[in-house]
Image (cartoon, rainbow, N blue to C red):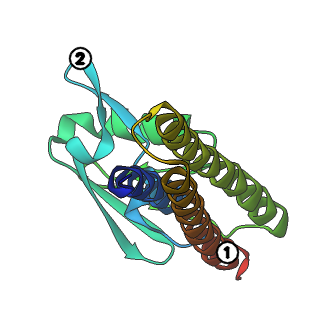
């Protein structure tokens, strides 16, 4: 019998990665995960922002970054400014960094949805790759009968459709959230 447990686990991982990517997509409201991709030069190496500072959302329009070491304030601020995709302009007072989140224009919202749709396509490609690997494994399995192979292939296709639908639903929620003013 062909087990689809491994394929389900791989597809779960694809979905989890996709959801993590969607958390980073800007929606017009301040969210600490917006800065998850920022790398800060500290102590002679590049480190993720969350390893050198605490990031919190003060309200819907402001992020507050409290560095663990006050000497890293300038490098944190410059790393945030350097990420042109975010388009943020941080201000520091020597102890904390405040990052105002400007409201999104209609054009910028559509651009963000378009970028997010590319992440959807990447996730779907990853799901199809898992499906293709499973099909290859099925063809290589000589100890299985034709009917078992057909049934397993249908299970894998159903699994792929299930996860594709989950990705589409998550994207729909995110795009509605982005387009909502």
Residue 80 image offset from top left, x and y in percent? 47, 42
Q: Which mark is residue 20?
A: none
Which quarter of the figure has residue 129?
top right
Asked if residue 135 lies left or right of residue 143, the reply is right
Q: 72 or 178: which is nearer to us?
A: 178
Q: Secondary structure at mark 1?
A: helix
Vertical comparison of 36 with 79: above or below: below
Q: Secondary structure at mark 2?
A: loop
Residue 178 image offset from top left, x and y in percent? 67, 72
Determine crowd level at label 1: few under 14, some 14-19, many 20+ residues with C-alpha closer than 10 A: some
Residue 22 image offset from top left, x and y in percent? 53, 60
Q: Residue furthest left?
A: 69
The quarter of the image holding the N terminus is bottom left
Determine crowd level at label 2: few under 14, some 14-19, many 20+ residues with C-alpha closer than 10 A: few
Q: Residue furthest top?
A: 44
Residue under label 2, please give it.
44
Vertical comparison of 72 with 31: above or below: above
Q: 87 or 25: which is nearer to us?
A: 25
Asked if residue 1 lies left or right of residue 11, the reply is left
């Amino acid at each position: 019998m062909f087990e689809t447990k491994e394929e389900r686990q791989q597809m779960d991982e694809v979905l989890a990665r996709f959801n993590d990517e969607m958390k980073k997509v800007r929606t017009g409201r301040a969210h600490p995960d917006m800065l998850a991709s920022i790398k800060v030069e500290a102590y002679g190496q590049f480190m993720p922002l969350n390893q050198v500072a605490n990031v919190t959302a003060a309200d819907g329009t402001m992020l507050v970054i409290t560095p663990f070491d006050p000497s890293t304030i300038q490098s944190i601020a410059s790393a945030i400014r350097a990420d042109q995709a975010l388009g943020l302009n941080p201000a520091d007072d020597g102890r904390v960094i405040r990052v105002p989140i400007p409201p999104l224009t209609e054009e910028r919202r559509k651009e963000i949805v378009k970028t997010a749709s590319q992440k959807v396509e990447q996730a779907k490609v990853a799901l199809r790759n898992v499906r293709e690997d499973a099909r290859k494994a099925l063809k290589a399995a000589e100890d299985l009968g034709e009917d078992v192979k057909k049934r397993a292939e249908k299970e894998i296709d159903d699994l792929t459709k299930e996860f594709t639908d989950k990705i589409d639903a998550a994207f729909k929620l995110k795009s509605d959230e982005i387009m909502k003013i």
